[in-house]
Image (cartoon, rainbow, N blue to C red):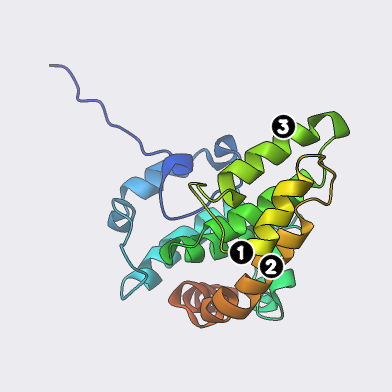
Amino acid sequence: IRAAAISTPRLDKMPGMFFSANPKDLKGTDQSLLDDKTQKRRPKTFGMDVKAYLRSMIPHLESGMKSSKSKDILSADEVMQWSQSLEKLLANQTGQDVFGNFLKSEFSEENIEFWLACEDYKKTESDLLRCKAEKIYKAFVHSDAAKQINIDFHTRESTAKKIKAPTLTCFDEAQKVIYTLMEKDSYPRFLKSNIYLNLLNDLQANSLK
């Protein structure tokens, strides 16, 4: 009799959450996911079952992700600090992941993806600037970009001119526009969303145990 092979889901391939950690660091957590029915499909909206979904994810957030302060465990205090400003939220690696997941639920994940791409671009060595600038422009800024960001015509045209002789600051204007858009629009909704409030409540409850 041949034993049937069990396909173990890979955390780095799971939809619905952004994992910045190396999948090797999450070794040993796969089996627990097999027992969790909520992991078999991603909820289409963050509705009634989001609390159970987030609760099931918290152990993996704690064990598999490190914040910008290099803590091993995501704390309620850290999550509370996310409500102080968008800057605080984006300065935290896990904050980026959770906010990105929220934006994905609103079909606007291109905003944080562009912002992060700009942050990475600023660290680029001079001989790679042109190549990287063209990739970012084609992916997010060009009028036919698959993940086109919502910026005004002037900013789009100005950015197009700047990448012809790329510098580390050629995306700064567009990045500022997108940051302001997230700050005024998506960020306030994120703080009132189930994905944020339930994560905070669950972490606070865990801290009391």
At 57% from the left edge and 35% from the top edge, which residue is drawn? 24
Q: Which residue is mark 3?
A: 131
Query: What SS does tag 2 mark?
Result: helix
Distance from Cα at disc 2 to Cα at disc 3: 23 Å
Q: Residues within 10 Å of mark 3 (few under 14, many from 20)?
A: few
Q: Are the residues tagged 1 and 2 within 8 Å (C-beta)?
A: yes
Query: What SS does tag 3 mark?
Result: helix
Q: Is residue 146 visible?
A: yes
Q: Is residue 9 left or right of residue 147?
A: left
Give the vertical position of 18 relative to 89 (above or below): above
Give the vertical position of 79 relative to 65 (above or below): below
Q: Amino acid at mark 3?
A: Cys
Find residue 9 and report its horizontal and vertical position in percent: 37, 39
Give the vertical position of 48 relative to 53 (above or below): below
Dot label at residue 151: 1
Q: Quadrant of the N terminus?
A: top left
First along the sequence among labels 3 and 1: 3
Dot label at residue 60: none
Q: Is residue 205 left or right of residue 77?
A: left
Dot label at residue 177: 2
